[in-house]
Image (tube, rainbow, N blue to C red):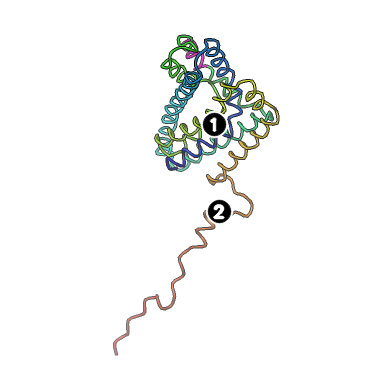
Amino acid sequence: MTVIGALAAGFAVGIVGSVHCVGMCGGIAGALAMSVTAQRRESATELARHLLYGLGRVSSYALAGTVAGAFGLAAAAVLGPAGTSLLRALAAALIVALGLYLGGWWSGLAAIERAGAVLWRRIAPVTRVFRPGGSLRGAFVLGILWGWLPCGLVYSALALAATSGDAAGGAALMIGFGIGTLPAVLGAGLAAARIGAFLRASASRRIAGTLVVALGVWTMVGSGLLSLPGAASPHDHCAGHSAPAASSQDAPQAAPQGE
């Protein structure tokens, strides 16, 4: 996967999964917005603060994506193609599970989020040092910490980042993912009541869930893990281009025998 391809893939996951971001991060963004408004900050400063929250969050995603990409590269080196196929299958399964979770059809992904809460319990106390509405530098640091909030969407994107081929690809995919989530999270912070209510509506969640499931299926098809009816497999394609049989003209002729 090229860096541009990784960015695009991550951006797609972030955009279609933004409903989950509002559910997980919208409350935090809204609380930050109310804190800033209570202090009567200028609108330009408020916008800069939210952008820095988002930039810090994307920075954490990039770091996690670098580790995931390096892990995927090591797995491929040790296990070969089987390791890569296993990671792709895991990524596709997590994306499908996320879609089912978003649509309200299956909540199995919540168990993974609860597992991630173990790390978050160690990070959460540090966030109290950087109060909302503080300095712009503090906003960036708070965004970095915020990026480690347990989230099934992030874990699905990280599984996909592990299949990107290397550390740079993993970082690029997670940067694209973070950028894709920015509009919804930023909107939830600046207009929490209206945007949050719209994105949390059951119809919106079902539409987003369907799109995410389709993305997971597309990941399976693109990785060769699932074949659609009527689609030619790579082996069929290769068989159609097999080397032609040698003709009688190409066959070596026997040397004439002496008289």
Query: Where is the N terminus found, in terms of image quarters?
Result: top left
Quadrant of the image occupied by residue 117: top right
Q: Which residues are magenta?
A: 118-125
* Camera sees residue 129: yes
Quarter-of-image position of residue 71? top left
Residue 101 image position (x, y, % from top left): 64, 29
Closer to us: 192 or 171: 192
Which residue sits at x=52%, y=55%?
235
* Residue 158 visible within the image: no
Residue 156: numbered disc: 1
List x then y, in percent, for residue 150. Answer: 54, 21
**Residue sitting at 65 percent across and 32 percent down?**
100
Q: Please state the horizontal and vertical placement of residue 239, each as a whole percent of the image.
A: 51, 60
Work out whether 39 lies above or below 225.
above
Q: Is residue 256 left or right of residue 225?
A: left
First of labels 1, 2 by sequence position: 1
x%, y% of residue 161? Answer: 47, 34
Q: Is residue 219 above or below residue 177?
A: below
Please report contact status of discs 1 and 2: CB closer than 8 Å, yes or no.
no
Badge 2: residue crowd in 10 Å (few <14, some 14–19, many ≥20): few
Which amino acid does the dot numbered 2 rest on? Ser
Residue at the outermost left position: 258
Q: Which mark is residue 233?
A: 2
Disc 1 is placed on an element classified as: helix
User: 119 left or right of 70?
Assistant: right
Q: Residue at x 57, y 19 (%)?
A: 114
